[in-house]
Amino acid sequence: MPLTLTSLGCASALPTKENYFTAHVLYIRGRSFLLDCGEGTQLRLKQLGISPSAVERIFITHLHADHVLGLPGMLSSMHLLERKKPLYVYAPQGLEKLLSFYFDFLGREDSSFPIIHEIVEGEGVFPIYEGETATVFAFPMNHSIPSYGYLFREKPVRKSKPRSVAYCTDTAPFPELPGWVAGVDLLFHEATYLEEDREAAVKYKHSTARQAAQTAKDAGAGKLLLGHFSSRYKENRAFLEEARPVFQNTELSLEGSTFTVPRQFTNDY
Ligand SMILES: [Zn+2]
Ligand SMILES: [Zn+2]
């Protein structure tokens, strides 16, 4: 019963030759969830052999271009592929403007499938979806516009400890976050900057690699994945070198990488 997180990109506001915009596919026991949808997301899915039709639900963190501009193209492809099952898109208020661009400007009022915008809004950690395989929670980030992190908790299965994955981008560090994702098995956390550019991180409400590592440490996370790197850095490796002294089990969420959360067996029945 695999649980994996696949990176479709790790760039932030500007893509580079190597890095596409930050987006991920979370696969939990036969269900695929897309996390963010910047430009190029559907191409990355294609390159990795993941059909857009397999995507059940999309979780958008916030309405900055690098997280959402791929959506109209992706919806259009789903329509051309004659998708029938409804698509649920979780996103903060405002997405309806992008959806009306899709329906009105692109003339897709004949969409082959229903698109349901579930507005994400609230304080603290609050549930937004309960499915067969996972319960999903949202919580506010600390960014320049309303932004939400997502926490996926696997539904209990016999003889297994339920696994969990948290997705935190874009955000500056804030005191409540480690408690909200405490004990998570896999934490994706943005690291737009390195410590040498801490000023920019403060100004644009992002995190440095060291701050992300501190959050992972304080949360007691199992593993930390870093992404959403600023295009100002030519070498992604520096993020790892900055984070690991604080939180050893850190990896870079480079495009095409898949991270597995292994099953942990218990004696419970
Ligand atoms: Zn961003
Ligand atoms: Zn942003």
Image (tube, rainbow, N blue to C red):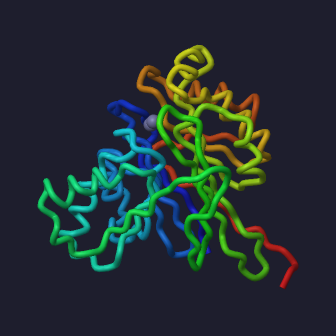
State which quarter of the image contains the N terminus: bottom right
User: In the image, is 31 to the left or to the right of 117?
Assistant: right
Q: Is 187 placed above or below 205 here? A: below
Q: Quadrant of ligand 2?
A: top left
Q: Nearer the viewer, residue 225 or 168?
A: 168
Q: Nearer the viewer, residue 48 or 58?
A: 58
User: Who's the residue at 70% across and 48% down the image?
Assistant: 223
Q: Position of residue 27 (x, y in %)?
A: 52, 66
Q: Position of residue 38 (x, y in %)?
A: 35, 46
User: In the image, is 152 to the left or to the right of 21?
Assistant: right
Q: Quadrant of residue 113?
A: bottom left
Q: How many marks?
A: 0
Q: Quadrant of residue 224?
A: top right
User: Who's the residue at 77% across and 53% down the image?
Assistant: 183
State which quarter of the image contains the C terminus: bottom right
Q: Position of residue 193 (x, y in %)?
A: 54, 24
User: Who's the residue at 55% across and 29% down the image?
Assistant: 206
Q: Quadrant of residue 118?
A: bottom left
User: In the image, is 76 to the left or to the right of 52?
Assistant: left
Residue furthest right as drawn: 267
Residue furthest bottom as drawn: 269
